Image: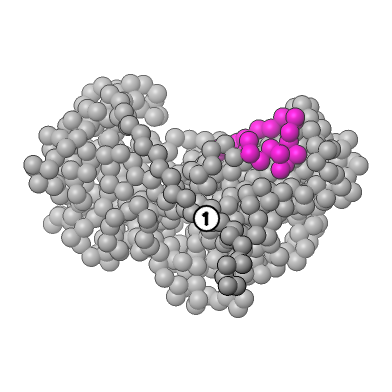
Amino acid sequence: MAEHCAVIGVGQTQHDAKRIDVSQYGLVREAAERALEDAGMTYADIDAVVVGKAPDMFEGVMMPELMLADSLGAVGKPMLRVHTAGSVGGSTAIVAASLIQAGVHDRVLTVSYEKQSESNAMWALSVKVPFQQGMVAGAGGYFAPLIRAYMKRSGAPEDTGIRVALKDRQNALKNPYAHLKLEGIDFDQIANSPMLWDPIRYLETCPSSDGACAMVLGNAAVAKKAPKKPAWVHATAMRTEPTMFSGRDQVNPQAGQDCARVLYKKAGISDPRKEIDCCEIYVPFSWFEPMWMENLHFAPESEGWKMTYEGATALDGDLPVNMSGGVLSSNPIGASGMLRFAEIANQIRGEAGEHQVDGAKKGLGHAYGGGSQFFSMWIVGDQPL
Amino acid sequence: MSEAKQPIKSIVTPSRLEYDFTPGIATTRFLRHMEEGRIVGQRCAECTKVYVPARGSCPRCGVATKEEVEVGPNGTVTTFCVVRVPSENIDLTLPYTAAHILLDGADIPFFALIQECDAADVRMGMRVEAVWAAKEEWGPTFENIRYFRPIDEPDVPFDDFKEHL
Ligand SMILES: [Zn+2]
């Protein structure tokens, strides 16, 4: 990498089921302006804008980045759109970082969003394929059989998913931007919530949210002048694999394993469990926490659930996971990956507020998408690598 | 009166898009076989895996697949979920069981519906058979198979299908 890249500004919207107080334009500006303010900048200081969101079918607006150019101060500047399904928020941040690392730009604004209330995501995710019967009911319908496969393979206790959901929902109470804040949430409420896609319960599921996230990224010279402590990008990685091939392991996909392996290598990490202080990972259904702990090499295969069970992933554990409440608490799909990347940057910057992990120096941001076939990840640290 | 003063913040405007679907060579052959009541996949000459429905090439080896292999009509449930939540474009009575079914002779499972069986009785490893629509209703579509139902055979051990979850 030719240039260092650092996160110098972070902004996110209030996430909610329906942000009818703002348009799509207003939603992205709310996040972008907070990120610019955090970086001590205005739109005029920005060299280029990189935008990401889930497929256009979600809001029914084709190539919305074009209509958003004006709102994001991008007129007359380079603007890029990134598409990688649910992992897009992470991939978008990585594309923005690569523009800095390659020396193309000094200051890049990157924004991702979803306004699910202007759409029907369940419909968009359940489109009938010609000549086939429609039965895959949204993302839950797709992922529930894989969760059942994980449960069978690992022999994990049946309440693992409930424990993850309880932890993330309690963490969300400390996050002022979270969509779902369930005061007094307890184990029994989650255990007794209805099965939507058996074995996935209602309270083990992410909500549908309106929201946006933005970051200002800069090179070393820009970062040195930033008003707040930067989070330095140590490594980024993206990997994909086909949705369908014989023998594909969808529970522990090779693309995710490979992505993590190359990420740690680039970041000079040999023992991720020891060297990484905390993580924000993409967990839309609670059982994905143990599944991804294994995929990310934090635990041996079939033992990820032990980390949840032993409290390792709790806010006061040895590897806190989803301190913000995660995707289970706010899911503006296109922004959900960038929220992971931005939340982990804020941990390193010491800007995470009530859900701050004391002394966090190195963190992992993770996103996945499609049928567990797109992966994007980054490692950020408090010093340049 | 006060209602009239409420600002209109959003309106719903349904839109539709119609398109012609061209299935391509491999899917056309698959659909023509379906029209005759046969489920036919394709074997990869390199890795010997049988794909159904075949797309005309092996996603792992990247080579064209030509050899046709009849598979099914019986198969094994490798994993499944019970759907209890409605979706606008799915016309099925809740709850229903959507399963990954590995047809006999195939090397990749696909999503299909399980019926004539209580959701609580569906198991990983359960043996099932295809239930076809009446012959006069057959067309070039996978929907000729209405669903799968259990058959009286012992469950397949997990180790025998764990590569195909
Ligand atoms: Zn092959």
- Quarter of the image with the C terminus of chain A is top right
Q: Residue at image x 59%, y 50%?
A: A114
Residue A63 placed where, x, y %?
A: 57, 36
Residue shown at 27%/35% (left/top)? B52
| Badge 1 residue CB within 8 Å of ligand 1 | no
> Start and end of the magenta stretch?
A65-84
Q: In screen coordinates, is A117 left or right of A128? A: right
Find residue B162 and report its horizontal and vertical position in percent.
Answer: 34, 47
State the residue lying farthest toward the front: B1
The furthest residue to the right: A225
Which three-letter amino acid code belongs to the residue tagged 1? Ile
Name the chief secondary structure element in magenta.
loop
Residue A104 visible to the viewer = yes
Q: Residue at x 58, y 60 (%)?
A: B8
Is A124 on the left or on the right of A9, as rendered?
Answer: left
Q: In the rendered image of this protein, does residue A270 appear above or below residue A309? A: above
Q: Quadrant of residue A107?
A: top right
Q: Please, which colouring scheme is shown?
A: one colour
In the rendered image, residue A147, in percent from the top left (x then y), is placed at 43, 56
What chain is tagged by disc 1?
Answer: B
- For this view, does A104 lie left or right of residue A139? right
Observer-nearest residue: A312 or A15?
A: A15
Label 1 residue SS = loop
Which quadrant of the structure image shows residue A155?
bottom left
Q: Which residue is mark 1?
A: B11
For disc 1, the neighbor class at 10 Å (few under 14, some 14 to 19, many from 20) is few
